[in-house]
Amino acid sequence: MIDDPQPGSSRSRTGWSESAENRAAPAFSREHRDQRRITAMRRKLIPLFTLILLIFLFATLFVPWPRSADLPEALPSATWTVLHLAARDGDLAALRAQLVAGADVDETIDPNDPDYGGTTALMMAAASGNTRAVEMLIDAGADLDRRDQRQTTALHWALEFSRFDAAAALIRAGADPNAENDNGARPLHLAARHGDRPVVRALIDAGAELDSLDVGGMSPLMRAAWQGHEEIVTQLLEAGADPNLTGDRGWTAVMSTARTGCAPCLDALLEAGADLHQRDALGRTALIIAVAHGTAEMTGHLLERGADPEDADAGDTTALSHAVLRQDPERVRLILDRGVQLDRATDLGLTPLMLAAQYRSVEIVERLLEAGASVDAQAPNGYTPLLWAARYGPVASLELLLEAGSDVHHQDEDGVNALMLAVREQNIEKVERLLSAGADPNDRSVDGATALWWAAAVGTPEVVERLHEAGGDPWATNHDDLTPRDIAAYRIDRDGETIKSYLERIGPDIE
């Protein structure tokens, strides 16, 4: 309870004593006491609520909800029958009791169930790998080729979950080896992807089509090659799979191996007559795919097996340019060792050295220069490798290009040179290197701007001062008759004020 204000206290000076406010103090005190109780209660409850929230977050973020891949642990919905549960759990006694009692062996889960709609007990047993339950349901007359809402059969379910014994039992019983689910996948696609030789053999013997394509445009051979299953690749080829079959986007099994790096798979395909030079819809060969998306080891293996190092895709980007874009010195070396054209440009007019100059791999720039790449080749906009390096690349690449004899005075189609680009990037190190190499701070672009003008517009005080020391004219005007000091006045940042003050100190007021 709050005491009445005492004379001389701060509350006394507010006039509370001998006032209506003072008479109201007891009521105020009760409200205050209640508020304190509420606050204390909140303080006790907050940790509890926090704990509950943490438990909820842990449950949602770290404890997976039932998915198709968690079938054996999935929680049954109201439409699951005892037969479904017994098949899933491999409870043979319960399963037998249900069948003896006359349960419908092909009864399905509600088609509206998002994960298991249309699923039968046989599918449950197959997906769970309960082979004895599968055999019991088959003996009871279960429909081997019944489909769920995704057009998936029991054989699909078994193979999707790598339940190979259950799959073998279904194949022996006569399950359709060519049934397609809604992804166009047949049992052989799944068996090849998961890499089980006996099941692949059983499917082939049962009449599975070797060269069917799924929705992704992939054949069983392509799937096996993608996964690096060398034995399955060999098995399918020996059975007669077409090594040069192309998918919807021109994809081949060789391209699968190039992408994922299975050298033995590639060798098996080539020995079976696969074409190493086929192109996909983007004009890419296996070599281009390996360089751009695969491994350096596969790149080297393809070159050893006869891939053309001059290969280029539909955008005229060569294997060498792809290696540069990948920023992998080892791939660049592998291709350079084959004696390729060094300055072949992409459809955008960019040579490998131009591409390298933009990225951070100084080693690649060095390798290309040592091989003899042109330092003064020009892109359609007039950029040379030096201009690309001045704008985007590291200082070390710029230095290498200067040492190799790049023209420091070259200007692009707008009259912009390397020094102006370095100034725009506010890179004092590049500015220093270019000035040391003889760059002229008074060269003008098409619009009459000099490097110092650009420094005043977007640069730093340090760059402005260095250009002035190098002889840059602080009073040179552009085609709009604006001096560096004029353009600095338009800046609202601190550097702009510093630059303007500096320019005012070094020359007369020309306003």
Image (spheres, grey):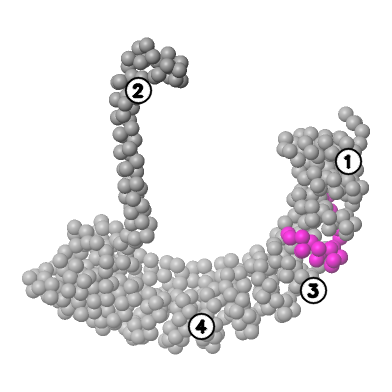
Q: Tell me the residue at 30%/38% (across/down).
A: 41
Find residue 3 and name its label.
2
Residue 477 visible here: no
Q: Does label 4 or label 2 sit earlier along the sequence? A: 2
- Mark pair 1, 4: CA separation: 67 Å
Q: Residues within 10 Å of mark 3 (few under 14, many from 20)?
A: few
Residue type, label 3: Glu
Count the numbered circles shown.
Answer: 4
Residue 402 visible here: yes
Q: Nearer the viewer, mark 3 or mark 2?
A: 2
| Magenta segment boundaries in residue numbering | 393-417
Report helix, strand or loop for mark 1. Answer: loop
Which residue in the protein does label 1 denote? 474
Q: Tell me the residue at 73%/67% (across/down).
A: 362
Which residue in the protein does label 3 denote? 370
- Residue at the far left: name it: 101
The percent position of residue 384, horizontal first and vertical second, equals 79, 60
Q: Residues within 10 Å of mark 1 (few under 14, many from 20)?
A: many
Report helix, strand or loop for mark 3. Answer: helix
Quadrant showing the N terminus: top left
- Mark pair 3, 2: CA separation: 91 Å
- Mark pair 4, 2: CA separation: 90 Å
Which residue in the protein does label 4 denote? 265
Q: Is residue 99 left or right of residue 258?
A: left
Q: Is residue 503 magenta?
A: no
- Mark pair 4, 3: CA separation: 36 Å
